[in-house]
Amino acid sequence: MPYNSGMLTARLNVFLFLSVGLALAHEGTPQAKAFRIENLECKGIACDLREGHQAGLTALEAHGDFRGVDSVRMRLLDRHRKLVVLDKQIETSSHGKVDITVPAKDLADGEYVLRIATADVPRLLAVGTFRKASGAAPPAAETPQAAAPPGSGDAKLAGSWMGIKNTGGVLVLTADGKYTINGGAGEYRVSGQNLTFTGPLSVWNGGKAALKGGVIEFAWTNPKGAKRSYAFARSR
């Protein structure tokens, strides 16, 4: 049917109405609240924490190698409510590798169990546990020597630091005690060979790191006795 001027005007009005509505909806969308992942433990699969585009929004990623398995079934269970909150089948690569991202930002606070099994005949391949809690990481206890003013940086450390040892992202330090990583930002302070970070990096060891052999390393043992380590080396 050919358009007439009335029809064209009506369609333009609808288009403008929808465009303005979407713009207002986007402008009024509140920013997601920060949260943290604690007590992360995985067996049979490698688990890692990645900072999101917004500071404090952590993503949980898991990487497995299940050769001879065409697909796996991922189930995420809320431990206390005894509910399955995620249940999906994921195809593996030709070499049996699988990458999984858990949308932690959509989960309620609480303790969770991640189970990876074969999709056809159920056979448990890997399991993981973690706890989600709202808010930034609690401040770490400081010794009097480390109680430097917030944001006290070091010009010698300023620059880009690339993640190593399976640590993702690029950490950029500035001489005024500020940093950015993967879209997030925070502050850091230096006391001798020790560094303390606020913001996104506070999820690792309460933000405590050390400069060892030219590498900034977050290393600690969690309450269950598992050792954790994330490190950055200066970019060449």
Image: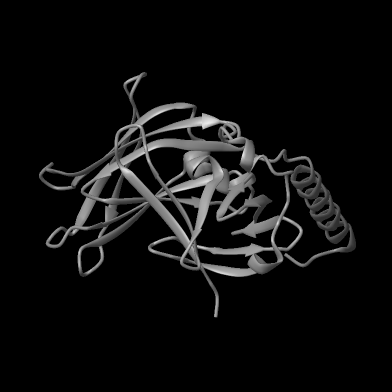
Position of 129 with respect to 189 (left or right) is left
4 relative to 196, above or below? below
**Residue located at (52% from left, 51% from top):** 209
**Residue located at (50% from left, 68% from top):** 214
In the image, 120 versus 141, the foreground residue is: 141
Q: Position of residue 61 (x, y in %)?
A: 40, 51
In the image, 161 versus 156, the foreground residue is: 156
Position of 60 with respect to 47 (left or right) is right
Image quadrant for the N terminus?
bottom right
Position of 116 with respect to 198 (left or right) is left
Image quadrant for the C terminus?
bottom right
Quarter of image, res 38: top left
Judged from this view, the residue extending furthest toward the top is: 81
Q: Position of residue 123 (x, y in %)?
A: 12, 43
**Residue located at (56% from left, 68% from top):** 161
**Residue located at (58% from left, 36% from top):** 143
Judged from this view, the residue extending furthest toward the bottom is: 236
Q: Position of residue 32 (x, y in %)?
A: 64, 39
Q: Position of residue 176 (x, y in %)?
A: 76, 58
In the image, 195 versus 106, the foreground residue is: 195
